[in-house]
Structures are given as structure tokens and as C-alpha cells.
Amino acid sequence: MLLTALMSLLLPLPQSKEFARSCDLLGQPLRRCRNDGGLVWQVQSRRFGPLGRLDLVSRGPVAAHPDDLVSWLRDWARWQDGRPLVLNADGLSAGALRGAGFWPLVTPTTLALLPLGTEAGMRAALAQKWRNRLNRADRFGLTLRETELTPDHWILAAEGVQARARGYKGFPPAFSAAFAQANPGAARVFEALDKGRPVAGALMLRHGRMATWQIGVTTPEGRRCHAMNLLLWRAMQTLSARGHDCLDLGILNTQDAPGVTHFKLGTGARAHRLGGTWLHMGALAPLARRLPLRMAA
């Protein structure tokens, strides 16, 4: 309940002003919409082959009460330009989305959201094994530093190599570089160095009272030293001290990355299930409303 209440007051990265400024810099401006109830959401528009131009709303709008989202779902089209809408839903049930004529595309994912607070409170929330590794990391004598992300920072090239090797897709390194340029001081790199050589790095993007773990890379030596435990703990302390209430650690993938999932949850993060990805298109809407609920879950 505490996490749910907290999240209702925070804007995830795709709905933040910092994200919008980054997209503007990349030549992909967003459109901000506001309904009569005061809800605000950001819309990306992209062209997808024969489907033409589609609008995308990712993890928005953010509402203080579920009834506000249900109300938004009834009249969102009044603020659109008639284009099909892809919605990465958060806080809306499959039944409500289906009833509004949305067709399910991708099943829901689950995020790890970490509440930030006092150092004592955050340490108490750590899993015992996670805390033990943090204590061991302290004994390796690593040097920690925090720097601003620059276009030529080593972590961007390392992330590109890591993404290709592991076969995952996300925001490209160019987005992180644009975020840093558009939002001075908001893209922070935490590094662990052994004898002056980086063995691990973590990029944190700051947006409002929330922050997002955007990149995490480590070397075999860094893994041996549990450097990422040390870096993430330092980031948690720093972000909390700067007024952030929640750190988004990204998707939990128990099937393909069980070790990373265990690492994220060991911080005291809570699993937050999103509502899946849905499409609203005129021709599909009547069919979507008759879709059996079990197919829309």
C-alpha cells in the first residue's frame, strides 16, 4: 500500500519533463496532453510501415486515484488526433482496457521499484545475502567516484557491447547522452575503480522525485569484488540525500536473468506489475470489446 501511494505521486521516466527535453534534443518531440480532470500525459508519435503513424503513451498518465484513470480511459480520444494509440498501461485493469476497445499486444512486465529513505531504513530492508556482499565489497579497497555523464564516457560504449552480447533492447546509449545534455546534472555515473581502472559503473537518471537505473556494467573483477552492490548502495544514499523518493531498477526477468532479478529484489525493492501493452485502432475496437477476458489478461 505504501509503494502504491508513493507511486501515485511520482512520474516514471517516459512521463517526465526530463524525458521530453531529451526527445526534443533528439528531434523526436513529444506532445503533452491534459484532460478536463487535470491529468497530464506525454505522447510519442512514430510511423510504423503500412499502419502509418501511431501514438504511444508509456506508463501514463499518472493519477492519484484509480477512478481518475478510469475516467481518462473513457475520454482519452478527445485529446488525440485520431491516430491509433499504443498504450503501455500502468494502473488499468485488463477488463477496463478491453471494455474501452483496446487490443492486447504484449503481456504485462514487472518492474523493481526501490523506495528510498533514511540510510538506516534502507540498510534494514536489504536482504541478508545482499548486505553480506556489500560488507565484503567494502573490504576490497575499491575507489568510488561520481561523475556527470559525457558523450565519450566509457560506460556508453560498454553498454552497447553488453546489449549486443546479451541480446536485449532498451534506450540506446545515444538517448542517455542526450538526456545528460538536455538535463545538466541529472545523468550521474557511479564508478568503482581498482588501482585507477574501472571495474563497474552504473548510470542513474534523475527526474523529479524519482530516478531510474539506466545502465549497469561490470567486469569479471568487479563481480569478484561485488562492486555493483557497493555502487548501488552509494547511489541509493546519494539519491535519497538529494530528495528522490524512489529508484526504478527496471524490468524483473526471472526466466532469462534470474541472477539480476535476485540482485534487484535483494535491495528491498518491491515488484510492481504493469498492465501490459495495448493497441486501440478503430477497426479492432469492436472486436476487442468482445474479447474473452482470459485472452486479455
Image (cartoon, rainbow, N blue to C red):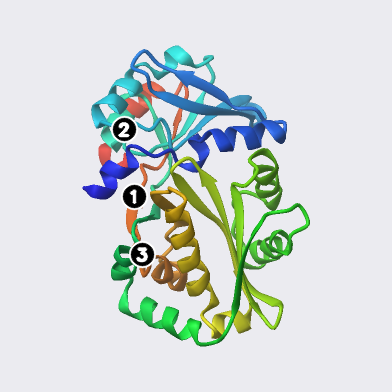
Instruction: Write down the quadrant of residue 275 in the picture.
Output: top left
Q: Position of residue 162 (x, y in %)?
A: 65, 66
Q: Is label 3 or label 1 in front?
A: 3
Q: Is residue 16 left or right of residue 97?
A: right
Distance between the Cα atoms at labels 3 and 1?
27 Å
Q: Is residue 188 left or right of residue 210?
A: right
Distance between the Cα atoms at labels 3 and 2?
48 Å
Residue at 73% x, 53% y: name it: 150
Residue at 36% x, 12% y: name it: 36
**Secondary structure type for disc 2:** loop
Q: Earlier in the sequence, mark 1 or mark 2?
A: 1
Identified by mark 1, the residue type is: Arg
Circle 3 sits on which residue? Answer: 119
Circle 1 sits on which residue? Answer: 273
Q: Is residue 53 left or right of residue 239?
A: right
Identified by mark 3, the residue type is: Glu
Q: Residues within 10 Å of mark 1 (few under 14, many from 20)?
A: some
Q: Is residue 112 above or below residue 80?
A: below
Q: Position of residue 183 (x, y in %)?
A: 63, 40
Q: Is residue 133 above or below residue 36?
A: below
Q: Is residue 137 above or below residue 66?
A: below
Instruction: Write down the quadrant of residue 99 in the picture.
Output: top left
Circle 2 sits on which residue? Answer: 291
